[in-house]
Amino acid sequence: MTRLRVLTWHIHGSYLYYLAHANIDFVVPFKPDRPEGYGGRGGTLPWPENLQELPAEEVRRHEFDCILFQSQKNYLEDQYEILSEKQRLLPRIYLEHDPPRHSPTDTPHPVDDPGVLLIHVTPFNELMWDSRSTPIRVIEHGVTVPDDARYSGELERGLVIINGLRSRGRRLGVDIFERVRAEVPLDLVGMESEMMGGLGEVGHAALPYFASRYRFLFNPIRYTSLGLAVCEAMMVGLPIIGLATTEMATAVENGVSGYVDTDVSRLVQHMKRLLNDRSEAHRLSKGARTTARQRFSLERFTRDWEDAIRSSVRRWRAADAEGIRMPAGEAAQ
């Protein structure tokens, strides 16, 4: 199969950055002023050359092998605005980044189509969504950090990495952060973190080195997908402290790579112990890094994505050659 060309949208910059490491050519549309979803190659990330951008009004005049949706707006609105009718018949994949918000157990996914392959980023998300007739596949995160970005843990402080924490409320754990910060020295980084006395945004390339000096990473988030910041911190070797909810309950093993619990007071006790026992923190650091290398390797991630896209396109082409409209999602079955 020749090198494939996939149209997608710029929804989550860090995820798009890792996705673009696959041996696939990705094209992202952009509009003037780069509104949400149409940022193209905007931002500060060092985009790989195989991630290209295209004015949104020109998309329908180009050839693609597959369409990758990454939001409800992409699927329900954007495709009808910028894609031609022929392009809307191509193999289609929907990447679901989040767990259901309305109800954790009874929310039907907006895609109910056996011709679309629905990819979840965590087993927890797949478990909770009602995906109905849509074929499903799970591709867990894959990340990488520079080889020389290694845990030292000399700072007797914990680190929290969340964008826009103040405005994102209880779901992201703003109240938990404030409660714990009153008892344990914590630094907050991320967009708009200055609004809560944080240190501001740290660039993607600098973040692994910046984080490596902290004793542990604290993740106060109650309910979301497993954050890439957690995976990246584990890859550096930071012990992880967080709530035992969503995929965090399986990503962190108590006493091996950090501690998770639903009792915040017990998490505070673990933090205080790590601040006072650097050798214990280093022991957990080894477990965190080992877990990350085994579960969140970029090589496995890109291999899974290449297989999902190529399988969908191959099956679609074979059916099309026979005059059959085979649901693209069946390529994963």
Image (tube, rainbow, N blue to C red):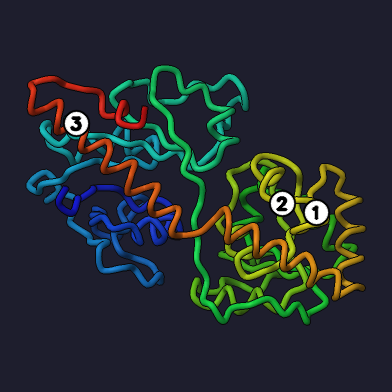
Mark closer to the observer (1, 3): 3
Quick check: can you spot residue 233? Answer: yes
| SS at mark 2 in the image | loop
Asked if the residues shown at circle 1 and circle 3 are in contact, with their CB atoms under 8 angstroms apart, the answer is: no
The three-letter code of the residue at mark 2 reads Val
Whether 109 is drawn above or below 227: the answer is above
Q: Position of residue 120 (x, y in %)?
A: 47, 38
| Residue drawn at x 14%, y 30% as measured from the top left | 318
The three-letter code of the residue at mark 1 reads Tyr
Of labels 2 and 1, earlier in sequence is: 2
Identify the residue under disc 3: 316
Q: Quadrant of residue 314?
A: top left
Q: Position of residue 9 (x, y in %)?
A: 31, 49
- Residue 259's tag is 1
| Residue drawn at x 92%, y 58% as measured from the top left | 269
- Residue 252's tag is 2
Asked if the residues shown at circle 2 and circle 1 are in contact, with their CB atoms under 8 angstroms apart, the answer is: yes
Whether 87 is drawn above or below 163: the answer is above
Q: Position of residue 2 (x, y in %)?
A: 14, 51
Q: Viewer-proximal residue, 117 or 217?
A: 117
